[in-house]
Image (cartoon, rainbow, N blue to C red):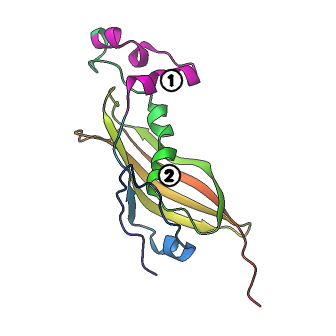
Amino acid sequence: MKPLALRTVEMEDISVEPISLDVLLASVGKEVGVSPWRVVSQRMIDQFADATDDHQFIHCDPERAKRETPFGGTIAHGFLSLSLLSAMTFETMPPLENSKMGVNHGFDSLRFLAPVKTGARIRTRFVLADVKVRPSGWVQTAHDVTIEIEGSKKPALTARWLTLTLIERQPEAA
């Protein structure tokens, strides 16, 4: 089987064709996707602060953050950057054939390495690290993800992200 080809998807082209389990398995160890750049706006940060009740001034008060932090202004919550992984995945990664749903399973590692300043553009690189097919019909994938900040040598975060996908069982051929 041919491994996944590296994809960079433009925002207007976010439909990604499903792939077979064999193609997924052949792609272990390969970079399998790079998401489009997306802007992290103050509005997005404020909405995340409202949703999580985390209104620390470094995120929500541009004037104070400019005066009192080394960042020169507000920065995104680390968990906001992390939560954008789902959207960047849907824009970039092909779904498995016959998949019914996918769920987060957790992280084996996670490090926040650099702040994402308001107005910065970020994207995610995906490397498929592992695939485990479970007898229950679930497929567990581990992706090494790096959220890059445009113009920065240091990424916002790195993580090993575990997800589960439920595959609809196909009737056996007679």
Say the numbered circle drawn on residue 47.
1
Q: Residue 49, image x and y in percent?
A: 51, 21
> Camera-side residue: 73 or 168?
168
What residue is rendered at 53% in x and 77% in y? 22
**Magenta residue check for 117:** no
Q: Where is residue 93 in the image (x, y as percent from the top left)?
A: 47, 58
Q: Badge 2, how many Cα within 10 Å: few under 14, some, many 20+?
A: some
**How far, Cα to Cα, is label 2 from label 1?**
21 Å
Q: What stretch is highlighted in magenta?
A: 40-66
Three-letter amino acid code of the residue under disc 1: Gln
Q: Nearer the viewer, residue 118 or 147?
A: 118
Q: Residue at x 28, y 21 (%)?
A: 71
Say which mark, if any, is on residue 118: none
- Per the image, the residue denoted by label 2 is 90
Earlier-in-chain disc, 2 versus 1: 1
* Magenta highlight on residue 51: yes
Circle 2: element type? helix
